[in-house]
Image (tube, coloured by chain):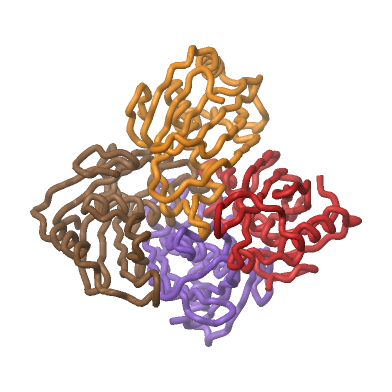
Chain colours: A purple, B red, C brown, D orange
């Protein structure tokens, strides 16, 4: 369940994301997690695309989703994101996918990211200090909420 | 080139949309056209998901894209959409994909949609009168501009 | 780890499945699980598309993947699939994603499917008897192996 | 229409490729064109992934598809591919998407690829001589047919 700093990301279901059951195909929730993750980290001051240019990057080590209710074309979706756990090289984010109009929880998920030496060995490296600091601060936060529409800030977060 | 009513749709490039060349994979532009199309039609008062429930729907008959410059992860993208042509059962929309920060044109595209009897024969039917009227009005417009962020209105268009 | 009847599904990495890190994007593994799942169930005599027409269907309740090593464009991939668990309304399949040339394990995953009354309430229903029987037989099997290329049988399994 | 050397690629429709209209989403045909293109070029002796490592690569300059009839989950699809045109830096392939059981034509398409200096300027460069030679031979061929299942050769083509 959401804890610490919770960042909200909004998006609208694309027709491309639906399947022949008339609902969003299960793999697309992991794409939404990515959109929410990038947004969460941007709120923390971590710009993923710039970091990668500097040879700092992470890969996904584990991904999990529990599906509670379906999402449909054109629905407004909110994704709450928070720090679930911090390790030496890895950190885990939690996600709650919500129908933006009814507030119904549609899915709960987690992803674990591990920092790698992207330029050299691709072996795990300790979480870079400023990232660790920001993650710890978010984890220990008193429960603020930031928010973001995909592509444009509507709350505290800045997409740029 | 854009003409008549031009509606702008904004989105941000997802990591999921990139490929091993480091740029957006070519098929995803057609997904972006869909996001822009749904938004354009919503601006015209045509709610696709409600229309489909009423048995009115269209399918894509033709799709075309010319790629001029690549798009990259996390870039802000604007898609201009306008009416290119109106037939008896079909209509063609034009799209211009633009880098939202540099204003560079990245791609130009077209899709032709044809209305079908979705409940029965799946044969082409004339464009429903209110849709035709709205399309003609957009085509003959003096060049207004509406705008929309994916998931939230920022201009004239309302996503709800 | 694989147990009981293990069905192998082969596919080749599409360029569309790669991302700007030069490897297969993490969400696509769940699409591969679907390809493997459909193939596994077909091997058991369960044709998903015919079942859905009869109002019998399942949805994904949980999905999990652990990523061990990356996959790249054009690599040959093998996915081993087996029955992990059988409940009243749900069953869990296990997956091992393997590099088809080096035999290296790239990922391990699980999905839990729950049968729903697709025509009526969309509430969970008991696993249909013939499906349950086939799943139990697969789970209790002495470790045979069936195999299938995406789109054409190469082993025991028949794609038709 | 198919001419010269025609290479056939087979695949089976994934559930992930369907949409809420119950048919394959229009953008996925361009992914299928990619699968067919890679296979066509491999048949000609051009290994795309090896070429990219050598700094030789192409990007898509134009893509077009005309949709004639829908494809559905689990259907067997055949894609015929041939050389449509050869320029200085670019070449155009044609595609015919066919229902593998009924032989009905589902879609016709084209993509134009342009060779770029991938390591340096990213400007167009002449088609590398061995590729041009192979493309010309295919174009001028008397109408042989090669074939390939996605992931495994079934005809003349070798996926390795």
Residue B35 vs D143, above or below: the answer is below
Measured as percent of width and height from the top left, residue C57 is found at 34, 64
B13 displayed left or right of C81: right
Residue C131 vs B83, above or below: the answer is below
B155 displayed left or right of D33: right
Question: What residue occupies the far front of the structure in this picture?
Answer: B121
Question: What residue occupies the far bottom of the structure in this picture?
Answer: A142
Q: Quadrant of residue B10?
A: bottom right
Residue D80 vs D31, above or below: the answer is above
* The N terminus of chain C, quarter of image: bottom left
Measured as percent of width and height from the top left, residue C140 is found at 11, 60
Measured as percent of width and height from the top left, residue C44 is found at 21, 53
Residue drawn at point x = 38 percent, y = 57 percent = C30
B7 displayed left or right of A148: right
Residue drawn at point x = 67 percent, y = 30 percent = D123
Q: Count all numbered tags in the image, as a single digit.
A: 0
Question: What residue occupies the far left of the structure in this picture?
Answer: C142
Along the viewing direction, whichever of A63 and B45 lies nearer the viewer: B45
Residue drawn at point x = 39 percent, y = 26 percent = D147
* The C terminus of chain C, quarter of image: top left
Q: Quadrant of residue D68?
A: top right
Measured as percent of width and height from the top left, residue A32 is found at 51, 64
Along the viewing direction, whichever of A103 and A114 lies nearer the viewer: A103
Q: Is residue C29 visible?
A: yes
Q: Is residue B96 visible?
A: no
Residue drawn at point x = 11 percent, y = 56 percent = C141
């Amino acid at each position: 369940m959401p804890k610490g700093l919770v960042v909200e990301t909004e998006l609208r279901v694309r027709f491309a994301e639906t399947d022949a059951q008339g609902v969003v195909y299960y793999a697309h929730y992991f794409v939404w997690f990515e959109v929410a993750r990038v947004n969460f980290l941007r709120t923390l001051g971590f710009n993923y695309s710039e970091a990668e240019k500097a040879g700092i990057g992470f890969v996904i080590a584990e991904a999990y989703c529990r599906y509670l209710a379906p999402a449909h074309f054109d629905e407004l979706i909110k994704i709450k994101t928070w720090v679930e756990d911090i390790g030496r090289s890895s950190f885990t984010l939690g996600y709650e996918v919500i129908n933006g109009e009814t507030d119904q929880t549609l899915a709960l998920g987690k992803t674990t990211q591990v920092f790698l030496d992207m330029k050299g060995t691709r072996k795990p490296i300790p979480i870079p200090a400023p990232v660790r600091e920001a993650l710890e601060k978010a984890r220990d936060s008193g429960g603020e909420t930031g928010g973001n529409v995909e592509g444009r800030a509507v709350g505290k977060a800045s997409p740029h």
